[in-house]
Amino acid sequence: MIEKVLNRKNLYKAYRQVVRNKGSAGVDGMQVTELFSYLENNRDRIATSILNHTYVPQPIKGGTKRELRAGP
């Protein structure tokens, strides 16, 4: 399932949805206008770290930890 989520086509579909929704900067301060370039430069590294279970997400706003869980 995670392979489908990390598929390049699906990632860019999600990116386009964020742009369409005029997403705001996250806790990292990255603007939507910076996101495409970031994905282009880091997609493979991020996908590999997720698949290798070494990806560590940043905390959500407010400083609490975010747990990644499988969906229903």
Image (tube, rainbow, N blue to C red):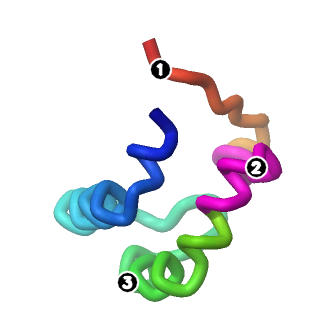
Type of amino acid under label 3: Thr
Rendered view: 68 above or below 10: above
Where disc 1 sits, the SS reads loop
Which residue is label 1 attached to?
A: 71
Rendered view: 45 above or below 50: below
**Horizontal relation, residue 46 to residue 25: left or right:** right
Residue at the (54%, 75%) spot, across then down = 30
Q: Badge 3 local density, few (<14 within 10 Å), some, or many (20+)? A: few
Type of amino acid under label 2: Asn
Which numbered marker is on residue 52? 2
Mark positioned earlier in the residue sequence (3 or 1): 3
Where disc 3 sits, the SS reads helix
Mark positioned earlier in the residue sequence (1 or 2): 2
Q: Which of the 4 image quarters holds residue 19? A: bottom left
Distance Cα–Cα, label 3 vs label 1: 29 Å
Which numbered marker is on residue 33? 3
Distance Cα–Cα, label 3 vs label 2: 29 Å
